[in-house]
Image: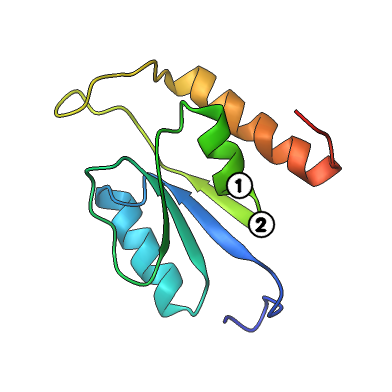
């Protein structure tokens, strides 16, 4: 762990952690000794050493599960025009849902 992070700090959540930028971030966080959780689609490979939650950032239940216990969120998930259908993904609405889920968790609100 980095010196500035207490041992009970929790984990860092990286949405899109199997993508180009996400993979580099996950590697860096792991090298720094952080616990890392990645929210990624079913068919996207993720680096060993990270906890993986499979699903879409457009699925509120999946996001809620991924955020639980995370103390830091790096939202790198994005719809790429190739390989994956949109499945309701909208950058603005998905980011809003993710932020609301984090806020609810931080202030102890239920859905």
Q: CA–CA distance between discs 2 and 1?
A: 6 Å
The answer to whether 64 appears left or right of 44 in the picture is right
Secondary structure category for the residue under label 2: loop
**Which residue has dot 1 on it?**
67
- Find disc 2 in the rendering and name its residue: 69
For this orientation, the residue located farthest to the left is 82
* Residue 2 locus on image (x, y percent): 58, 80
Instruction: Determine whether 29 is above or below 69 in the image.
Output: below
In the image shown, does 30 or 56 lie closer to the viewer? Answer: 56
Estimate how packed mark 2 is, as few (under 14), some (14 to 19) or many (20 or more) residues with alpha carbons within 10 Å. some
Quadrant placement of the N terminus: bottom right
- Which quadrant would residue 64 be assigned to in this image? top right
Whether 39 is drawn above or below 104: the answer is: below
How many neighbours does mark 1 have within 10 angstroms: few (below 14), some (14-19), or many (20 or more)? many
Which residue is drawn at the image coordinates 28% and 42% (left, top)? 42
The structure residue drawn at horizontal position 83% and vertical position 35%, both measured from the top left corner, is 109
Q: Quadrant of residue 61?
A: top right
Asked if residue 54 is positioned above or below residue 29 in the image, the reply reads above
Q: Is residue 64 left or right of residue 16?
A: right
Q: Which of 14 and 50 is in front in this view?
A: 50
- Whether pointer 2 and pointer 1 mark residues with C-beta atoms closer than 8 Å, the reply is yes
Q: Residue at position x 74%, y 37% from top? A: 103
Q: Where does residue 9 sit, x and y in percent of width and height?
A: 69, 70
């Amino acid at each position: 762990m980095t010196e500035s992070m207490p041992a009970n700090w929790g984990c860092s959540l990286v949405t899109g952690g199997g993508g180009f930028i996400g993979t580099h971030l996950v590697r860096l966080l792991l090298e720094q000794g952080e616990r890392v959780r990645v929210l990624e689609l079913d068919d996207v490979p993720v680096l060993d050493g990270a906890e993986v939650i499979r699903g879409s950032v457009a699925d509120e239940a999946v996001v809620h599960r991924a955020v639980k216990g995370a103390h830091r969120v790096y939202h790198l998930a994005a719809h790429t025009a190739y390989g994956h259908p949109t499945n309701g993904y909208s950058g603005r609405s998905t980011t809003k849902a993710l932020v609301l889920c984090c806020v609810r968790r931080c202030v102890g609100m239920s859905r």
